[in-house]
Amino acid sequence: MTVNFNAFQQPFGKIRIISLLAPNIEWSNQDDAVGVFGTPGTAGFRILSIDQNLPKGFTRGIGPLQNMTFAGWAAADADALETRVRSTTPQTFTLNGDVNTTELPQYNDTRNPGIRVYGDRNPWYRAGYGFAFDIGETAMQASYSFFIENLIQPVIFTDGFERP
């Protein structure tokens, strides 16, 4: 999917675009985690959204950028992350990831050896993450592309309810 931005009369100026994702992989719980594949800011970089107890989830990656740069990513409890993004002291985003490890401690996921995985089986936390992009100040048009891959057991929704 590609998201396009168009300035009509003058360049954008200084603008940061933040794209948040707060999945709830398994309807009956909130024990989701995020994992990091690849090197942030390069081709092949993806964030894995996965249920900690079931083989369900997907990855989301970044495709081509036009007149914008990838500024970084962040992860935390989904609701807290959104609150921090909207606050007067906004959430920071870094290339290596600004992860709130109090809300999403790092752990070893035997299903995904060799990748960083963050999550908490606390039912009050739901792993969410965001990507940040900076539009070039003199740009009149900009775009970013992203993709979602279902690499493990599909999550299928019918009539608003999850089905195996």
Image (cartoon, grey):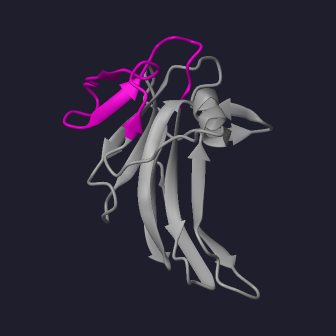
Which residue is most to the front? 88
Query: Does residue 119 show up magenta in the picture?
Result: yes
Is residue 164 visible in this depiction of the protein? Answer: no
Left or right: 53, with 117 as reference point: right
Task: Give the prevailing secondary structure in the magenta stretch.
Answer: loop
From the top left corner, tell me how far across and down residue 108 is, in percent.
Answer: 25, 23
Q: Residue at x 59, y 60 (%)?
A: 17
Q: Nearer the viewer, residue 34 or 79?
A: 79
- The segment highlighted magenta reads 98-127
Q: Quadrant of the N terminus?
A: bottom right
Give residue 32's position: percent from left, percent from top.
50, 26
Which residue is most to the left? 114
Quick check: can you spot residue 100? yes
| Left/right of residue 159 with respect to residue 27 in the rendered view | right
Q: Residue at x 58, y 20 (%)?
A: 30
Where residue 78 appears, as percent x and y from the top left, is: 59, 31
Which residue is depicted at the point 26% across and 54% down? 39
Residue 77, by quadrant, is: top right
- Judge from the rendering whether residue 19 lies leftward or rightward of residue 100; answer left or right: right
Q: Position of residue 142 (x, y in %)?
A: 58, 78
Q: Quadrant of the C terminus?
A: top right
Q: Is residue 13 magenta?
A: no
- The residue located at (21%, 33%) in the rendering is 113
Which residue reaches farthest right?
159
Indicate whether 2 appears above or below 103: below
Q: Quadrant of residue 111?
A: top left
User: Which residue is nearer to you in this view: 139 or 142?
Assistant: 139
